[in-house]
Image (cartoon, rainbow, N blue to C red):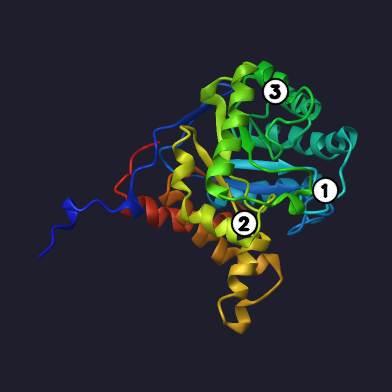
Amino acid sequence: MTDFNETPNPLFAPLPNFALSANGKILNLSKPRIMGILNVTPDSFSDGGQFTATHTALARVDEMLRQGADIIDIGAESTRPNATPVTDELELARLTPIVTEIKKTHPNLWLSIDTSSPSVMAQMADLGVDIWNDVRGLSRAGAVDTASRLALPVVLMHSRGEPATMDKMAVYDDVVAEVSAELGGLVGKAVQAGVRRENIVLDVGMGFAKEYGHHIDIVKNLGEFGKLGYPMLFGVSRKRFVGEILAESGIETLANTNPAERDTASTALALLAVAQGAGIVRTHNVAQVAQSLAVWYSLSNKIDDD
């Protein structure tokens, strides 16, 4: 009989021993962490308009924390394909009252802001926000210098162009090699500007300047991006790519265009990402991901105190 204890199973390999530090807190990423999504926009592709009022946003934060979220990521600008850009003033008007109230009720919560504006992030940092999640990888003017000055964890995501143009820029000879090289370039610029390496998290940018086949190749080879030597955030929740997978299943009832009906498939992809080294999973459905990761974590024999 095979002794399975002597046969390492890559599905349950331990996560890299990374940790993030901000505002006197430490977040250990050797256990997979859940980043709950809170969109305070009227036009996000999945939940636009649901949480624009402060009281509904706070209720949603409370719900996600009860369900198992470790981080709450708040976005005030939709970055879906062809989304309309917003001004810094509008972002701040959407974010400030909600962030202020969250910090009052949950002062020790790990709070992330999904923004590409250095001005917006600087003002959010003054309110006690911990993580800068930038889908443009600090490419806007002044962003790398602001990130260096704030000295907070920053998520560098891979993309090309802007929401209005990124779909036209999804051209690759070798998507894994090219995305890896371009992420390495973002890291190099950030470090050169003074961003500390221990503050960098990488995101391959699912749904940004990539087509169906590119996404498949990235998911199958996600471990390659871990070779860059930084924590990985994986965000595929409810995205078009998930719907495309379901449409190819041949099962008519799965071929839907409703993003909220893609949660189970999104969670399956999240587990594949964690099994390949992703330390943070970004999701709309915290409860489902928390249950799935609890099973993975138990089977990986890594049940320890935080």
The residue furthest bottom is 252
Q: Nearer the viewer, residue 251 or 43?
A: 251
Relative to 184, 293 lies left or right = left
| Residue to which mark 1 is pinned | 53
Instruction: Determine the residue positioned at 62% across, 62% down.
Output: 212
What is the x, y in percent for residue 37? 66, 48
Relative to 132, 222 lies left or right = left
Q: Amino acid at mark 1?
A: Ala
Q: Amino acid at mark 2?
A: Ser
What is the x, y in percent for residue 294? 42, 53
The Cα atoms of the two marked residues, 2 and 3, are separated by 27 Å
Q: Nearer the viewer, residue 305 or 92?
A: 92
User: If the image is split into quadrants, where does the C terminus sit?
Assistant: top left
Relative to 234, 103 lies left or right = right
Few, some or many residues within 10 Å of mark 1 (<14, 14–19, 20+)? some
Q: Determine whether 128 is above or below 52 in the image.
A: above
Few, some or many residues within 10 Å of mark 2 (<14, 14–19, 20+)? many
Instruction: Determine the residue positioned at 9% across, 65% down.
Output: 1
Q: Amino acid at mark 3?
A: Val
| Residue to which mark 2 is pinned | 237
Mark 3 lies on a secondary structure that is helix
Q: Determine whether 88 is above or below 301 in the image.
A: above
**Eye-nearest disc, 3 or 1:** 3
What is the x, y in percent for residue 171? 67, 52
On residue 144, the disc is 3
On residue 61, the disc is none
The disc, 2 or 3, on the residue closer to the chain's N-terminal end is 3
